[in-house]
Image: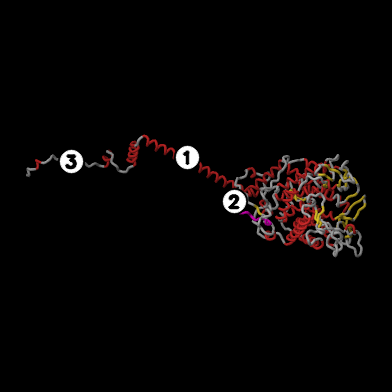
Amino acid sequence: MYSGAAAGPPRRDFISVTLGPEEAVGVGGYNNSKAWRRRSCWRKWKQLSRLQRSVILFLFAFLAVCGVISYTSVGETWKSITDKSLDDQRTEQAIPRLKLANPVVLPAPQKADANHGDYPELSLQKPPKLPHARRGPSNLQIKAPQRDTRLKTRHDTMRAVEELVEVDKAEKTEKSIISWRGAVIEPDQSTEPPSNRIMEPEKPSSVEAEDQKEPVPINERQLAVIEAFRHAWKGYKDFAWGHDELKPLSKSYSEWFGLGLTLIDALDTMWILGLKEEFEEARKWVANDLVFDKNVDVNLFESTIRILGGLLSTYHLSGDSLFLEKAKDIGNRLMPAFKTPSKIPYSDVNIGRGTAHPPRWTSDSTVAEVTSIQLEFRELSRLTGDEKFQKAVDEVMKHVHTLSGKNDGLVPMFINTNSGQFTHLGVYTLGARADSYYEYLLKQWIQGGKKENELLEDYMRAIEGVKKHLLQRSEPKKLTFVGELAHGHFSAKMDHLVCFLPGTLALGAHNGLAADHMKLAETLIETCYQMYAQVETGLSPEIVHFNLHAQKGHKDVEIKPADRHNLLRPETVESLFYMYRFTGDKKYQDWGWEIFQNFNRYTRVPTGGYTSINNVQNPSNPEPRDKMESFFLGETLKYMFLLFSDDVDLINLDKYIFNTEAHPLPIWVPA
């Protein structure tokens, strides 16, 4: 053995020990188990200082609070979106069931500088397929008086539904919509949902099929009427701007009240015809130059039907509050006329001084004048909430209802403002001084929702009186006509004014009155047409006399020299419009077209305007009178345009009633 090793340094001894898995864990060995990880994390946490642990706990708490806030915000947003979606679904289901009280008829014309080109080009554009309720601006709010809460509720519903429609329209397009006849409807950008109370109207009903139709494009005959209006307007603008009536031959004007009668009478006609530029320039005159504070006497009846009626109608069609404010002004200034002992109004009012008086030659007013202002004053009360206007005119009707002196519903022509009694008894006519009394009996009944039975009773009795006392048949064509009765003696005299009657009868039949009223209307409109067709110029005289006995070489119609003038009157065209609207018979349009062409042939003045004529029997020289009445633009051309239209929603006769100057006013409770 080698014995030299004992002499080196001392040796260290090592012991090797091998541990199994269980033992390793027991002494803290790592095997990646969850238990080992938890103990390891806890050990590390305990090794941190107190400050470090506090910071970490604060961060965790902060993150937790932020998480709760974020969750709440996201939840509310999601809930809002979900609720809005559900509301939209309910709205889409509810809107078709709502029937608007008085939807606007036409879209608002734009300012004169709107670059949309000429009217005929715009009229040919295909209009968007919009529900009927969207055809007007949303800013038209027809305010009902507080005394009629049911009516106010209906108009509140209309207002809310219009907001719904505008919101829906804004979501579908970001651009302005070219609508009916070239006018533009600007979409409402508001997205605020309307009140839920509109979802339950008083009487839910389905929207009529006609409300879903697209507007009917204008046709060549309507375009011809537009051209005629522009020609007449050119003469008025060039030679009579701001004055009452144009004298087209002398290129000057005449004044009646000094209130721009022709301009005001034509406002709603321009709107209906879609003449935006002309309407805008007329509106500027109304805003800047129409002043009622003038020391001038005006006729109560003429001012009411032309000025008050024209302003109210234009307000309803355009939604422009300017016209309502002007209507309030003139309405208040006309009220002194009712300060009489009998409450039967005087015929004349000084609108500057606030005084009223009868004509200089009598203390009587004509029955037609005092009973044909009701539609306008009643509507003014409804819009303003001021009962005084309607109260004044309703008292007149109630008084006339109780008067003696009628003959089976037919009334005399005059009534005394002091005693309140009929005068000049025994003379009965449906012509001048009495005509519109009968017209307004029916129209007030319709305007008020067919509730005022006294008005209907007086109307029905009067029509029976006409049948009993005033109807005769002529020779040789056996035309049915309406004559006059004077102290028991029948006269075969018929004013052109009486040709309002066929249209009124047809309107009554359309609203549920006796069917024989429509039959009578059909026979009378034939007579009114023959008053044109049997005359050399194809234009009716002011008055005709009918032959009651057949005579060789004689027509049904005889014309006296004093009666052969034509004033461009509208009554026959008015009745043709009603007859076509209710029957659809194209012959009425054809008759109207004949009359329109004869107006162009014999009354048109080349330099602008149309003129009344003295002699309808002389085609070579009809003897022009150098005067264009305001009603030619306010009534005659308007009814022509409506007659030639096949669009029943162009002034829907279930929603609007025309006053006796052809200004449409809304029916309070539409059919």
Mark 1 → mark 3, Cα distance in angstroms: 61 Å
Q: Is residue 247 left or right of residue 212?
A: right
Residue in the foreground of this view, choosing between 579 and 203: 579
Labelled disc at residue 14: 3
Q: On the image, which quarter does residue 126 sit in?
A: bottom right
Residue in the foreground of this view, choosing between 9 and 118: 118
Q: Residues within 10 Å of mark 1 (few under 14, many from 20)?
A: few
Q: Is residue 4 left or right of residue 503?
A: left
Residue in the foreground of this view, choosing between 35 and 70: 70
Task: Identify the element where label 3 is drawn.
Answer: loop
Q: Which residues are magenta?
A: 173-182
Task: Identify the element where label 1 is drawn.
Answer: helix
Residue in the foreground of this view, choosing between 148 and 497: 497
| In contact (CB < 8 Å): disc 1 and disc 2 | no
| In contact (CB < 8 Å): disc 3 and disc 2 | no
Residue carrying label 1: 68
Is 175 inside the magenta-drawn segment?
yes
Residue 133: x %, y % from top left:
67, 51
**What's under tag 3, amino acid-wise?**
Phe
Q: Nearer the viewer, mark 3 or mark 2?
A: 2
Residue 534: x %, y % from top left:
85, 62
Disc nearer the start of the sequence (1/3): 3
Q: Residues within 10 Å of mark 2 (few under 14, many from 20)?
A: few
